[in-house]
Image: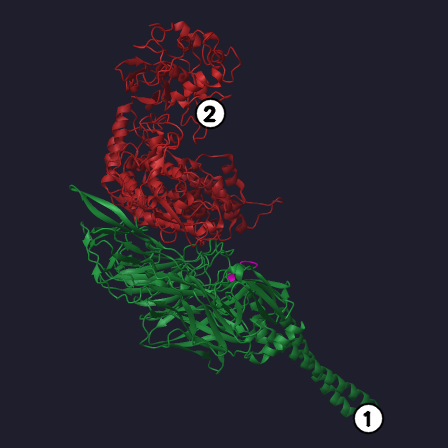
Amino acid sequence: MSLINRIFWRAMQPAAAVRFSAALAAAWLLAAWTTPVAAQSVCLPSPRLLTIKPMGGQAGTQVEVTITGEELDEADELTFSDPRITAVPKVNSAGQVERNKYVVTIAADCPEGVYEARAMSRLGMSSSRAFCVGTLPEVTQTPGNHSLDKAMELAVDSVCNSVLSVRAVDHYTFQGRQGQRVIVQCATRGIDSRAIGVLVVADSQGRDLMVERRGGAIDFTVPEDGRYVIKVHELTYQGGPEFFYRLSLRELPPGAPIPPLPSTRPVNAFSWPPVGLSTHAATTEVEDSEAPQRITLPADIAGRFYPAADVDVYEFEAKKGEVWWVEVGSERLGLPTDPSIIVQLVTKNGDKEQLTDVAEFSDIPSPVKVSSNGYAYDGPPYNAGTSDAMGKLEIKQDGLYRLRITDLFGGTRSDPRNEYRLVIRKAAPDFAVVAWPLHMGLRNGDRNALSKPIALRGGATMALEVVAIRRDGFDGPIELELENLPPGVRAQGLKIPAGKSRGIMLITADVDAPRGITNANFYGRAVINGETVTRQGYLATMAWPVRDAWQQIPHPRLMADVPVSVGGSEAAPITVAPAKADVIEAVAGSKVTVPLVQTRRSDFSGTAITMKVFGDGFEQAPSVKVPLNADTSEVVFDLAALKTPPGEYTIALYGGAVAKYRHRMDKLQQAEEAHRKAQEEVNALSEQLKQLEAQAKTATAEKQAEAEDTREKLAAQRQAAEAQLKAAAEQLKQATATAAPKDIAEIVVSEPIKIRIKPAETK
Amino acid sequence: MNPPTENALGAILLPTITTSRLRCFFMPCRYLLSALSLAAGLLLGVPCGSAQADEGRISFMNDVVPVLTKAGCNIGPCHAKAGNGQNGFYLSLLGFEPDEDYENLVKAARGRRISFASPKNSLILLKGTARLPHGGGQRLAPDSPEYQVLLNWIRQGAPYDGQSAPKLVNFEVQPSGGTLQRGAQVQLKALAHYSDGTVRDVTRLALYESNEEAMATVTSDGLVTAGDIAGNAAIMVRYQGKVAVYGAAVPLGAPVTNLPEPKNFIDELVFANLKQLGIPPSEVCDDATFLRRVTLDIAGRLPTEAETAEFMANTAPDKREQLVDTLLRSPDYADFFANKWSALLKNRRDSASDMVANFAFHAWVRDSFLSNKPYDQFVRELLAATGTVVDNPPVAWYKRVKDSKQQIEDVAQLFLGVRMQCAQCHHHPFERWSQDDYYALTAFFNQVGRKPSGVRGEDLIFHQRGIATAVNVKTHQTLRPAALGDAMPDIAPDEDPRLRLADWMSSPNNPYFAKALVNRYWKHFFQRGLIEPEDDIRDTNPPSNPELLAALEKHFISSGFDLKELVRTITTSRTYQLSSVPNEHNVADVQNFSRYYPRRLQAEVMLDAIDYLTGSQTVFNNLPVGTRAVALPDNSYNRSVPFLAVFGRPEGASVCECERISSSSLAQSLHLINASDIKSKLASPTGRAAKLAKADMPLEEKVRQLYVVAFSREPREDEMRAALEFLNEPQTDSSGQPLDPQKVAHENFQDLVWALMNTKEFQFNH
């Protein structure tokens, strides 16, 4: 163990909580190291909650859940994004806490929906897993229901929490009565499952009657009294703990609309609805209308892309010089649509009507380039854009106009669920922001960063990439803020500059920041039309870590909240910070030198980190080298080359370094200590035996008999101590193997650096 | 008028050659077949009529080009070879581009092919008559009228009359059809009608081809001879881009009495045809045969023991109709037909990451059949698919078929039965389709937009707003979308042209869409289409029973493109239920459906049948145990299960059903005899042989069970006797000691199962 490591781990020891026997922990460690953690050659281990089973419960009940995940050893707290859902660790009949089991209480007034569940681990708050609250009674799957003869009986009006097995088809049965309308639904992607669910209703012999593969419901009217079979499987028959689903079976009266299953929201939902949009639209589309529907502007219309190849046409009068903003929301409602809008001027040429294109609105593109292949980094793997449409409509002449709205994905699909909301308004400049943990090109790609929670190590600075969708011509700068942070944690937003779409949020934990968790408030702030406007921001995540982007389809989604936590058990391998907290001053056109301090707590591969710069005014600066073999360094920026105008700036450096990460050093230290004590015990007993044997040589016969008795006892004690030593040695061996340095590429972000550029003196 | 004498003709006649089907003359085309047969040289005919070769001026367009075509100079393997022809001399395929041909013949290569100073020593004549070494051999006899045409044309200064020459406006063959007794002959007369009102007898310059050599042959000068086999044959006659057909009915003339009572229009029309041809049909098959046949054809599997028992015990007069309905309701029907279609729709796995798309696409096809989605809707959803594969699986077709040319070629061949491939580069030699037709069809797909999706290698598909157009690569003319042989009103920029194409296809008046499907399905059930091949519908390839095809088409359209109803109509007909055992008259009939034509079980069905017979299920990668081979989603299993490849399961590389190999081969025989997978199935400790060996039941009952499973019928007495003798035969080791009876029983049952498996009765649907 290097000196640096010894100092580092000793320093952190008091914060490491030890809750399990050494043997149990060692056994777990061995298992953990050989399974999920082994995959993490990129990014330091993060706590990830991967499964929670059952995946939900009925409001007003208590549910016993079991969690699994990565780095969740010693997790002792399960939290939810709504205070009406609470959990306590499960205690068995002997009064002992059962590891990874919790009793969840769902308040009766907790609304139906999908909530975030997370576990607090030694490394901080885990990534999130969806937890559902429903109104129907819930059951869990009978294991092995993979054939007709082992089908699980399911009551109508119930929900079953289940997990798919590889190459298996789950079977359920229910009793139907003739004419009964039974709605069969299966939640998968919308509750973070990796499964693409296939749902089948079959007759009593298991012969398929109806199939649903696109996440919709099977609306089954029972043809005759009898037993019916429901089959569930994954599209490609994958299975395993992450392929969970909730099967719901409910009776509805004929004609009643089928309520969709609660679901998480797509990332692009952050920009919908526009602030102030009423819950219900003022106007509703008149379906089956031959003639265009007459409207007046402004307008707020609820319509749907139904039936197939539906074209809805609205007609309105507008005057020259008017400027309108058109926006449609549909994909952002979680629907598989691609709205497209054409506005045309209607003129008459004799009796003949003539249409002239005036404007065309389609996708709202991602404001930043999105990853093109999900493996090598060429942009974030999150798409803030949408196939919904938004744009400016400038009226060049008085007249009658027609707006045609279609779904570019709807040519052959007749699905009444595909709704849209069309808004035509006077300019209401605004913005919406969304953030996700920063990704960048690392040694082996950055696949494991995909579901990284904001769980900070002491001395670490984590960067969130923040992206804005701007509305109705708003072009000003957007300040970014994160408030309500745990003790010892600071946040610094690097603003989204005027006319740009990307900013950065830096979150820094002091090296001695204690274990803590808060639900932070993230927002963007801007001055619009002379008034300061604050908009809540959202955080996006991946539903599960994508380890193989070639084979897996990533599943990004929005989170309901922004939890920020500190684990308190480990420190960052390195902290790069300005030498002084003061603002560094420089004159425009000169060179500015930034003194840095590198606090290293790990060994690294290589001798320097190549770092780029975040922060308006400095992002064009060439990369700089920050040494990994020195405690201090300097970075120089040429303000003349950068052409950075006078003003206040906050920047940060970022890059990738390969740390020789040592996993569970606290366990190694415990094992070393235990081994040392066991060795001392053996040594002490051996010494006593030695002395006794020496004394026995000169003792009387009577004493010798007594001494023999004592010697036998001591020998037995030493034998026991040696067995303990052997066990301790084994544990030490395992802990040493676990803590063997492992190259892990990690994103390194400096603490914020403040620079003030003063105008150059003019002579 | 100076026709050649019979002797002169006889001297120049090359032996008549057997022409096989000519599909494309142009090298890059996929179906380049027996153009060589033409290259063997048919040098015949002389123009006659108003424009005399030796009297008036010789027309390049109407005299010279037809001579070159008849001589075979301008076919694909010769001077119309793609690229540069032969040795630098290029002629357009079949003379479709006379302007170019004139340039190449008279002006190119410094005019060396024509000698005005010494016309007889023109290179074209020296080579064509093989007086100078010529790779193509002698194409012109020096004393032939054709030679004289070329020589006179050169003597006249090799004039070009591209614009002024009368245009060929119509072409006919006389007679256009008739009954031809076996062995009888008829001389066809080919007449070309020109724009100036003249008519020329071009019998000797036209090209002839029979679609059924066994029924009728034709010589290169148009003499048709009926063969020994009765049936309907067609002779295709081509001349300068025009085609005409002579249809010959060759009757057998046997008495046709005691016809089964017709069940529907199929029977009426098939029996009427048989009456006309004098071919008496076989009897209606027995129940056991029908059960096995229809279960294999609809559900792609053998009937189960229970199904056999239930059907045989059923005494209802409509029990066959009941059975058809039961099979059509079953998911096995959906699995079997999805298997057929997903290969035709190229659901092919090229990389491991294709798996989700392939499973989704196959499942969409399968679910469409399960819910009996109308066929026009099915095709519409496929053609105009938008979105992502997981949300809308037919988008997967656009992942596999990306180029608009490939898209229209596939769509035309698969859904319209029209092969457009040739027309990409030149006027279709047998058809009316031009390059304009080809590219106007591609225009329907030219507004297909693609956006990157979250899935590697997959695009989001959408309609990109705009006026759809395509450019004819030859003329550089911009074309609007146009359906085959039909006008298409302007398509607004907002409108997805593919939807308009789908509208056109599913219109009741569409001459191809329903016809192609009913013909394809007819072939599925009868082994032979009413038009053969099933995806080559054209005027020059007439159906063997046009009235039946028209009636099926009408029925299918009026049913709302109901596929199950079509299958029901076909399989409940008496025609479908005729025995495969021929009578003394119909043994040679292969196209009039006077009996059921037996055929080998296809790869997947046979594997499932063997699994069922041996009681040992094949396990497929990534699929639940118990998945049948007919339910496999894509071609990847052909690699992991060699049986499927050996028995010809297609790879999803083409839209042609011919990709599936239905013939038998030595490899198949060897596989069934001693392949390790077959051996292990027979020897499986949980297999049927093992269970029967252990089962406590009479030996007769065990034999009976095997026959019912394998053939859906009871064993005959002689079969039972032979089986029992075999099973009861004492087995001893080399020292004469009796072997363990249990072991012997197991081995005996394996042998018996193996023997049944290798019978034709098992391997064929009959």
* Front one among A409 and A707: A409
Residue type for callout 2? Lys
Say what secondary structure mark 2 lies in: loop
Residue A131 painted magenta? no
Chain seen in red: B
* Front one among A533 and A31: A533
For the C terminus of chain B, the image quarter is top left
Residues in magenta? A443-448
Q: Which mark is residue A701?
A: 1
What is the residue that sits farthest to the front in this orientation? A763
* Mark 2 vs mark 1, CA separation in Å: 120 Å
Q: Is residue B580 visible?
A: no
* Front one among A258 and B196: B196
What is the residue that sits farthest to the left in this orientation? A351
Residue type for callout 1? Ala
Percent of width and height locating residue B94: 40, 22
Percent of width and height locating residue A694: 81, 88
**How busy is the neighbourhood of tag 1: few (under 14 within 10 Å), some, or many (20 plus)?**
few
Chain seen in green: A
Residue at 46 percent of width and 14 percent of height: B139
Please, is residue A6 above or below residue B643 in the view? below
In this rendering, would B722 be left or right of A430? right
User: Which is the main secondary structure of the residues drawn in magenta?
Assistant: loop
Which quarter of the picture shows residue B734?
A: top right
Percent of width and height locating residue A86: 39, 77
Which quarter of the picture shows residue B18?
A: top left
